[in-house]
């Protein structure tokens, strides 16, 4: 259990979520400059994309660990508790370290206008911890977009852009080209770039940006053909990008090290099997499409009782449409996030789609939804990473550690 004094500081950090998401680099550049971060000599691999960026980061981190390199890893959001966002190959940041770091940051930014956001403070906290830990390399996942994301204040050794799709359109644009331009904003002049074969509209933007900035570009054209610890054909592509990115960063790793890292990777809520359930945080149309494909490959001729929840502002109709072919029935549920879409709204979206009728149940809480499925059913939990984290905490008896978040 977190000490009450430490919890008070952590609660303050969560309270900064009320400042919302403010894209832009002025505040974070000032903050990092005052803190003299990042540490001198520390190198970064910066990853943006719509889908697969977290998995690609996890693959790279696992390979580096297998090679004896204690790299830092910064990702978001967390599933169960905040510490998951900041870790290295040895351990996660502790609650006491989080509290001490927040206390220093809180004093530093007192009176700032505009006030730094939750994500800016979290990034500063992470970079300070990586500096203290002496991590020679850091794998850095963007939060939202790329061009104006706080992580873009860092100049990396390699930039990686995973699959581009339609998500966060209210902030990033309503076409693949516009979204790709925001993601390609992480490309720095002369810094190597790795991406993958994908929609021509998005790929053209990435290629053009790399050319304009004289940044050498590698395009991964084949998936990894060996075993990985994450399930699904899309993960083979993420694994391949991870390998190419590490090579681009100058690592010369034995094939056995690479293979072991890819096999031993752990990245929860990506087609994760827990008891009789599959948990996957798929929350946009492309992720839902890959989830349905992976389900059909893993469980041919079997349909799922789907526990589904979503946050407001997503194209929930598109996600439900992609999952409909594998759905035996729906359990629409609320979950512990201020952004959660109400169950009546979810049912209304489903009804308006006009698919063949399926049994539909609604539940106020995730715990109720888990109790509502048949004992012998094949269960899929999907629709939001926030939902996935809460479900995982319940199923692994870690509810006491669960920390809800809006970002």
Image (tube, rainbow, N blue to C red):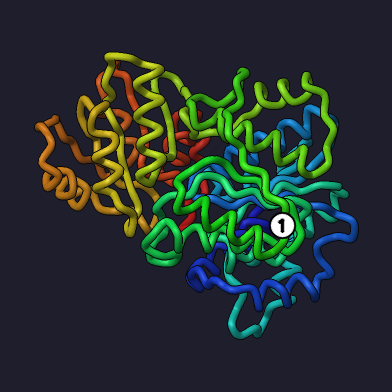
- Residue wearing tag 1: 215
Q: Is residue 372 left or right of residue 142?
A: left
Residue at image x 61%, y 18%? Answer: 227
- Relative height, residue 365 to residue 297 (above, below): below
Q: Closer to the camera, 21 or 4?
A: 21
Whether residue 2 is visible: no
- Quarter location, residue 100: bottom right
Residue at image x 23%, y 33%? Answer: 324
**Neighbours of disc 1 within 10 Å: few (<14), some (14-19), many (20+):** some
- Relative height, residue 98 to residue 290 (above, below): below
Q: Closer to the camera, 330 or 168?
A: 168
- Quarter location, residue 87: top right
Secondary structure of the residue carrying tag 1 is loop
> Horizontal and vertical percent for residue 165?
43, 49
Q: Quadrant of the N terminus?
A: top right
> Horizontal and vertical percent for residue 237?
56, 32
Whether residue 156 is visible: yes
Q: In this view, does 380 lie to the left or right of 47?
A: left
Q: In this view, does 40 lie to the left or right of 361?
A: right
- Quarter location, residue 278: top left
- Relative height, residue 250 to residue 47 (above, below): above
Residue at image x 32%, y 14%? Answer: 300
Residue at image x 33%, y 59%? Answer: 313
Q: How many marks?
A: 1
> Horizontal and vertical percent for residue 319?
30, 43
């Amino acid at each position: 259990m977190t000490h009450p004094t430490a919890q008070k500081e952590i609660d303050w950090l969560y309270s900064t979520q009320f400042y919302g998401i403010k894209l832009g680099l002025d505040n974070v550049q000032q903050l990092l400059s005052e803190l003299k971060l990042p540490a001198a000599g520390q190198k970064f691999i910066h990853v943006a994309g719509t889908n697969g960026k977290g998995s690609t980061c996890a693959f790279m981190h696992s390979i580096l660990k297998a090679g004896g390199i204690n790299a830092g890893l910064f990702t978001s959001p967390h599933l169960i508790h905040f510490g998951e966002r900041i870790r290295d190959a040895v351990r996660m940041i502790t609650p006491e370290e989080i509290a001490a770091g927040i206390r220093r940051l809180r004093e530093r930014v007192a009176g700032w206008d505009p006030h730094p956001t939750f994500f800016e403070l979290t990034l500063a906290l992470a970079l300070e911890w990586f500096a203290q830990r002496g991590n020679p390399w850091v794998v850095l996942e963007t939060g939202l977009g790329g061009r104006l994301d706080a992580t873009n204040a860092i100049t990396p050794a390699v930039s990686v852009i995973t699959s581009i799709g339609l998500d966060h359109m209210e902030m990033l644009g309503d076409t693949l080209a516009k979204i790709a331009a925001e993601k390609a904003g992480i490309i720095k002049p002369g810094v190597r770039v790795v991406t993958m074969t994908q929609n021509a509209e998005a790929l053209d933007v990435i290629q053009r940006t790399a050319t304009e900035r004289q940044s050498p570009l590698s395009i991964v054209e084949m998936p990894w053909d060996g075993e990985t610890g994450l399930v699904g054909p899309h993960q083979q592509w993420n694994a391949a990008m991870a390998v190419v990115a590490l090579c681009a960063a100058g690592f010369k790793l034995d094939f056995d090290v690479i293979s072991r890292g890819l096999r031993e990777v752990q990245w929860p809520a990506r087609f994760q099997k827990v008891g009789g359930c599959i948990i996957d945080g798929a929350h946009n149309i492309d992720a839902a499409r890959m989830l349905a494909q992976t389900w059909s490959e893993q469980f041919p001729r079997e349909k799922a009782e789907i526990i589904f929840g979503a946050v407001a502002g997503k194209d929930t109709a598109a996600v439900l449409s992609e999952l409909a072919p594998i759905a035996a029935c729906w359990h629409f549920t609320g979950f512990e996030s201020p952004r959660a879409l109400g169950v009546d709204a979810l049912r209304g979206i489903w009804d308006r789609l006009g698919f063949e009728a399926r049994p539909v149940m609604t539940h106020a809480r995730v715990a109720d939804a888990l109790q509502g499925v048949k004992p012998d059913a094949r269960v899929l939990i999907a629709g939001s990473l926030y939902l996935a984290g809460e479900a995982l905490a319940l199923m692994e008896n870690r509810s006491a550690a669960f920390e809800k978040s809006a970002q």
